[in-house]
Amino acid sequence: MDKTLRKDGEIMRRRVLGDEYVDKAKASADAFSAPLQDLLNEYCWGLAWTNDGLDLKQRSLLNLGMLAASNRMHEFGIHFRGAIHNGLSDRELQAALIQIAIYCGVPAGVEAFRVARAVRGEMDGKDRT
């Protein structure tokens, strides 16, 4: 394991998903699942999210499309919240979800809008930055 990449990945993960989410994920890990948290921080968040080839808004849009297409709606909700943290506007998110409905199918689009609405409802009254 690359400790620097893992550390940088956790910093990025916290930036996108928030300290509360990451703290909860780490606290709920046990001896069996803790290596997965290290893998996520190093590989997903460290290797992929910290390179400078794409900005965070672009990465968020890609993730939303891929997660909707693969019917990973729990992760879609997590990354929808992250997309808001990354500065995507309601207009940009709405356009992305329409695009998902067209290219992934209307049922995927309906579910994406359902999850997005729930996330936005949870975030109402909270700072979205």
Image (spheres, rainbow, N blue to C red):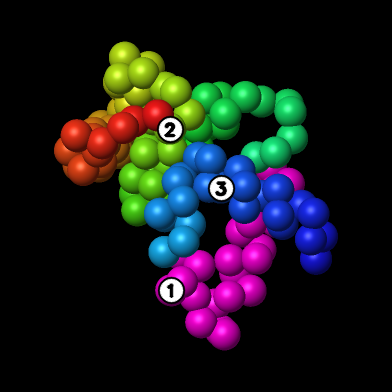
Answer whether labels 3 and 2 touch (C-beta < 8 Å): no
The reply to whether residue 77 is in sight is yes
Q: Earlier in the sequence, mark 3 or mark 1?
A: 3
Furthest-top residue in this view: 91
Q: Amino acid at mark 3?
A: Arg
Q: Secondary structure at mark 1?
A: helix
Residue 112 lies in the magenta stretch: no
Which mark is on residue 13? 3
| Residue at 76% over, 52% down | 5
Answer whether labels 3 and 1 touch (C-beta < 8 Å): no
- In the figure, is residue 121 to the left or right of 27? left
Q: Secondary structure at mark 2?
A: helix
| Residue at 19% over, 34% down | 125
Measured as percent of width and height from the top left, residue 36 is found at 60, 69
- In the figure, is residue 7 to the left or right of 58? right
Q: Earlier in the sequence, mark 3 or mark 2?
A: 3
Report the magenta residues as a range: 25-48
Measured as percent of width and height from the top left, residue 7 is found at 71, 54
Residue 35 lies in the magenta stretch: yes
Residue named by callout 1? 28
